[in-house]
Amino acid sequence: MHADPHGVLTGVHFLDGDHACCEGTLAAGARFSAGYPITPSTEVVERFASRIPTVGGIFIQMEDELAASIAIQGAVWGGAKAFTVTSGPGFSLMMEHIGYAAMTETPCVFVNVQRGGPSTGLPTLPAQADMMQARWGSHGDYGIIALCPNSPQECFDLTVTAFNLAEEFRVPVMLMLDECVGHMTEKVVIPEAEKIEVMPRRYTKLPPAEFRLFRPAENDAPEMTRAGEGYRFHVTGLTHDERGYPSMNLETQDRLVRRLSTKLASLAGERALFDAADLDDAEVVVVSYGITSRVAQRALQLARQRGIRAGKFRIISAWPFPAEHIASLAGRVKALVVPELNLGQMVHEVARAASGKARVIPVSHAGGSVHDPAEILKAIEEAVR
Amino acid sequence: MNVTELENACEVPAGACNPVEPFLRMERMPHIWCPGCGIGTTVNCFTRALLDSKANLDKVAVVSGIGCTGRVAGYANLDSFHTTHGRAIPFATGLKLANPELQVVVYSGDGDLFAIGGNHFIHAARRNMDLKVICVNNLTYAMTGGQTAPTTPGEVISATSPYGVFEPAFNLVALAEAAGASYVARWTTYHVNQLARSMKEALAKKGFCFIEVLSPCPTLYQRRNKMGDGLDAMKFYKQVSKVRNGAPTSECALTKAGEIVVGKFVDRDRPGYFDLLKGQMTASLGDRYAEPEILC
């Protein structure tokens, strides 16, 4: 299905990542957003609040992030495509509802423009330290998808992808920007509506008597309906059977909770999103994501100039972690260098996937600025020494 | 079958044993509520209100939080949502805004709506969001074993106030009025006809409507406080309740054993969220304003 031209601002623009992300939500068909102001993410919903009354939809500023993160789910079950936007402290408050969305298989998008933490941290400065929280922040076992754009253009493109994946897999999708990507202004090309693929909601065609709201269908994810259509369905955060009814039975728990993770397995392998270059002859590969990948690009250039056979693997879909790809790289290279704006988060996943077949060298940073490319270059040089 | 086609509220539909059966997910019976608990009584009143108001049940959604009353959503044979603790109102807000033709009823307990969810309650009332909020107030956290709630009256013994509650309790009807609710009423589970009538009125009223229903918890609240069983609660309600429609809500605070003022306290017209939204957008944007078309 193509995008609804109503929401698509076709043309060549000069936008920052937050604004481009907002245009992505509109192109993807989101007509509802609930938010709560927090730096450095607020521009996404500020633009949405300005644009949506002429497109035909609703923005509501809620009383806190708990409210925003559940209001969007009410809207989804009412029939909307919906999202919320936040940063570190607000993301912490949203954790319970990320769990609720995972458990109730509510397709929705959480945008997190990451800033320095912990706690109030560095409100106006970048970090990538919410990566593990995005994956594991709510209690219990479940799966989510997380995407990491590294430019305003990708903020647009991946926002559309985030909504599409949410519908396809019936999961909450995290869009993990960082303050730099959110506030960096670059050229953004928004295509014509008919060139933007939009995944429609997978509404069931079964009549109410035959429909089971949580019976796995395509991708092991169930089909959906919305309130008001005569299905008289029930949704609960309790462990539930295929009818959606609470069931405290161990077998139901096992079947449901395993499926919440395994339905996303293809994203760790053939469906993983990444950007790779210079891998054919590489003896060392820099694995990075988000803004850090752009700093790493400079380090890679410098390394090649010095005759080091260095390659690039940029993670785009960080969760599920593209483990199969990292494992295969690890079998071919001496070392994987992992710079990130935290004290070591995704590097643990890289090490786990590499499974001792290549050295894994973290380049940590407590956040507040990007790396100096020289730090990454130093790690590359050390890797091949 | 849409049971609202039945001629009168007491008619037993074909194939059923009880007039309210078509409103319930009978395959989920028996329910989890204790003997003497009043929640079932409120559900009965709610079904009567739906019947009397000839509501199209396909367009009625029930949203609950967590707790004993939170389980209402699971038994109502409607589109129903059992959400997270305290967040029924913001979930319902999203549901209503996305799909305004739904009649959205929030059905939850006092701990859920006024402790963990208190902030959402006052803001939804402030916005005059078109939600019907039914609060079953058993004066305690029952699901977790009878702990002190913001509604537990002074001197009451609870699991977390073993020497007696000393914090002042919320007066829910005064809170609702102050926050901006369009309709505010209070009944007990003794007042089944009045409660059903109030629910019917609220279903017909635009804007944020709040009905508090005092409901017994014999297992945890009454037993600990030597207040007898469910029947004793009915006798108590009968004895101490005083109908005072239009009473100033500031005079309606509850105590452990004193008078319970019941009745309809507020019934006023304030512009609703959608009216305000449309008014503002039309004033600012004129023809450029596009009516929300949210469904995907």
Image (cartoon, helix red, strand yellow):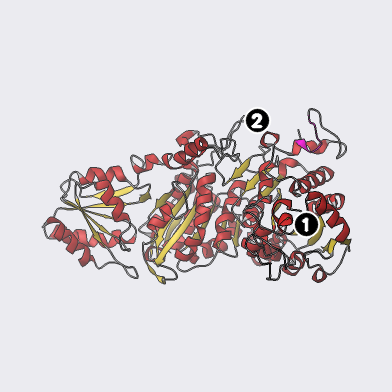
Residue at horizontal 57%, vertical 45%?
A238
Left or right, residue A133 beside residue B205: left
**Number of dots carrying numbers:** 2
Q: A212 and A236: which one is in front?
A: A236
Q: Is residue B20 magenta?
A: yes
Spot occupied by residue B18 in the image (x, y as percentages of width and height): 80, 35
Q: Nearer the viewer, mark 2 or mark 1?
A: 1
Residue at horizontal 69%, vertical 64%?
B127
Spot occupied by residue A329 in the image (x, y as percentages of width and height): 22, 45
CA gap between label 2 and label 1 equals 46 Å
Q: Classify 10 Å Cα crowding around label 1: few (below 14), some (14-19), many (20 and above).
A: some
Badge number at residue B227:
1
Residue extent of the magenta highlight: B16-21
Residue A331: quarter of image: top left
Left or right, residue A361 beside residue A150: left
- Return the residue at label 2: A209
The subunit letter for the residue under badge 1 reads B
Q: Is residue B264 magenta?
A: no
